Amino acid sequence: MRALAIICLLAGSAGLGFGDERVAALVAREVERDGVGSVSIALVDGAKLVYTAAFGYADIENKVTATPEHVYRIGSITKQFTGLALLKMSREGVVSVSDPVERFVPEMSRIRDRVEGAPPITLVQLATMTSGLAREPENLPTYLVGRADRWTEVVLEALPEVRYDFAPDTRYQYSNIGYAILGLSLERAAKRDYMDYVREELLEPLKMIDTDFVPRDHFESRIAKGYRLKDGVVDFETPAEEHSGRGYKVPNGALYSTVVDLARFVSFQLGHGPESVIPQAALEDNFDRVNSATGDLSSGYGIGFSVVRRGELVITGHGGSVAGYRAGAYFDRASGKGVVILRNVTGGELDVTELAMQVLELVVS
């Protein structure tokens, strides 16, 4: 596919001064490099969704033109909702962020290679990637299958194949299994199904009606078909299989969403409510606490968010990747502007995170 189908839907009046023409040209150029699949994008200015557009095909074989209403998997952006659930539960007295994980998941004793004399892992260490746990369990493919409603069973089955790489709170290490354990801890602490909690306490108040852990009847027909691109070969079978479930990867990577829904989430993170989810002051306090950073201070991680410095611009948010889908949702707190980019292709030359950063630099300048 070389000729791109482009749809641009603007919210508000023309001449927004938000760089929409330059953004469209940039995104179209990047999509054309691979010539496969689609990109949907949304731009946020404070509480307003000011621009949406879609480029390419949501279904290549059937030549279905992508729109901003198409649904994509968003991968690790799911971690932001798990981190938000931790913040909300801690404010409500259900947990303390410093609680030891073993209080809720005594099965942590099954994890291998615990550093002698090291203190137990805490919830906040799981949330900030400072637990010392390995990124994934060994024999990973074994734990990447299973319906979403079985994810807690798969987590527990995986624990004997998880190991400590470092003592807790000694360094940053990204851990998918760590976030799964965090979700399990919150579920047990609240005595409430994790997915139901996120739906009822976060997604519904945020009016994210096209966001869920599993395909829903009202949006299933709008799910963009996922593709994996490698050495010029396009594979759609593996991404299709994962719609039936991703094993333990629910609190860390199972959500589906649209650019419109994620734009609402970005506006919320920029402090535009609803306060019933988390008060603005509490959100700002959370974003002010980056618990770990790289040695050159170019990036860091807090409770459910990453932060990257590009020149004078400090960008907050998260990216995500699962088979056939890439996602990025980022914002600049100083200007109150944000960007969401969703793609139904993994592999190839288009780097969604880098594209999102470039777009944000463009609209903030």
Image (cartoon, rainbow, N blue to C red):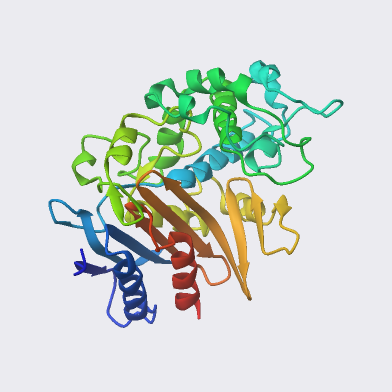
Judge by depth and name the residue closer to the eye, 324 or 169: 324
Judge by depth and name the residue closer to the eye, 318 or 97: 318
Total numbered badges shown on the rendered structure? 0
Whether residue 316 can be seen here: yes
Question: Which quadrant would the N terminus be assigned to in this image?
Answer: bottom left
Task: From the viewer's perspective, tell me whether residue 314 is left or right of residue 352.
Answer: right
Whether residue 277 can be seen here: no
Please say if 3 is above or below 324: below
Please say if 347 is above or below 76: below
Please report the residue visible at 28 percent of the width from the left and 77 percent of the height from the top.
13
Task: From the viewer's perspective, tell me whether residue 249 is left or right of residue 284.
Answer: left
Please say if 54 is above or below 81: below
Q: Residue furthest right?
A: 117
Location of residue 77 in the rendering, given as x and y in whole percent from the top left corner: 47, 47
Location of residue 123 in the rendering, given as x and y in whole percent from the top left corner: 67, 33
Figure quadrant of residue 182: top right
Please report the residue visible at 63 percent of the width from the left and 27 percent of the height from the top.
162
Please say if 3 is above or below 320: below
Judge by depth and name the residue closer to the eye, 56 or 7: 56
Please report the residue visible at 65 percent of the width from the left and 36 percent of the height from the top.
126
Figure quadrant of residue 295: bottom right
Task: From the viewer's perspective, tell me whether residue 137 is left or right of residue 59.
Answer: right
Q: Residue furthest front?
A: 231
Location of residue 339 in the rendering, given as x and y in whole percent from the top left corner: 43, 64
Location of residue 118 in the rendering, given as x and y in whole percent from the top left corner: 83, 29
